[in-house]
Image: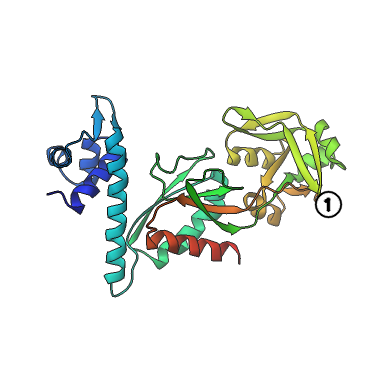
Amino acid sequence: MAGIADYRTFIEIVHSGSISAAGRRLNASPANVSAVLARLEKQYDARLLSRTTRNQQLTYEGEHFYQFCLLAADQEDELLNHLSKQQQLQGSITISCTCDFGRNVLVPLLDEFMALYPQLSIHLHLTDKLSDLVKDSIDVAIRFGALKDSNLVARRLADNHRVLVASPEYLAQHGHPQSVEELADHACLLISREGETQAEWQFNKANQIYSVAVNAAFSSNNGEVVKHWALTSKGIAMKSIWDVKPALADGTLVSVLDEFRQDDGAVYAVFPNRKFSPQRITALIDFLKQALQQ
């Protein structure tokens, strides 16, 4: 009869991408890992993985079984947490976050969180693309703006807005724009998402919306690159206040047109809508919310 150890082995097979890689992570031979998979498929009378010499993919039945294994592992971790006299959180947390916010804000906070709960393990994926939380096995994603996927749950962590920034050297050479319309005459540094460059900037001033088409001197799908271009005097960028706070504080970037701002929605912790929410996930979200609102 398969038990929780077998379920955890199956989770590792899915996460690692192959039986041999799972064996290395589990310090087990590929034969032993393969035997666990065979035992599970026999017990549940279903093919769980479709395998070739190059890759593996969950079958329809395997996807449902994988979600069952995640739930079983979470429940065991939660039980162990409650039974522990020290109430030490255990298990792993996989987090997805944008590159800039992840490096500049989240990483230092995770250092503090791990100092409180050293028995946890953190896996951090930095990407400016929206992760598929279920497909990519993400426990928590840090996102900006309103939640669109009704299959997910969002908890608000902090306010956020975007500001226009440039280096003092760029502004000394090209001048400070005095209106949003003047941005069309400046070199602008744009974010491209899913192959599309956001070449129109919108602003809010006294509840009135202003739009301006801007010229992309440089564009990238990576926010850190866009900030680098701003720091090296390539032009004006529109960045989340969280991403540029340190640079504004030390004067390496200067904000312009402060009366115009783009409300980019709040910072949210987003996670799959499960009946059972592991204590370690709740603890992380509570910690981040308190830290970001200080």
Q: Is residue 144 above or below residue 117?
A: above
Tag 1 residue: 206
Image coordinates of residue 267 in percent, x first then y, are: 59, 53
Closer-to-camera residue (218/172): 218
Image coordinates of residue 151 in percent, x first then y, are: 47, 45
Left or right of 280, for residue 185: right
Q: Is residue 26 above or below residue 87?
A: above
Q: Which quadrant holds residue 233?
A: top right
Image coordinates of residue 103 in percent, x first then y, are: 53, 49
Q: How is the image coloured?
A: rainbow
Q: Looking at the image, which residue sits at the far right?
A: 178
Q: Amino acid at mark 1?
A: Ala
Left or right of 253, for residue 97: left
Closer-to-camera residue (52/242): 52
Left or right of 22, for residue 240: right
Q: Which quadrant holds residue 135?
A: top left
* Residue at 78% over, 47% down: 204
Q: Is residue 72 above or below residue 115?
A: above
Q: Is residue 68 visible?
A: yes
Looking at the image, how many numbered discs can be counted on the residues?
1
Q: Is residue 186 visible?
A: no
* Residue at 55% over, 66% down: 290
How crowded is the residue under tag 1: few (<14 C-alpha within 10 Å), some, or many (20+)? few
The quadrant in which the C terminus is found is: bottom right
Q: Looking at the image, which residue sits at the far bottom?
A: 85
Closer-to-camera residue (161/188): 161
Image coordinates of residue 219 in percent, x first then y, are: 65, 31
Label 1: state its secondary structure.
loop
* Residue at 25% over, 33% down: 49
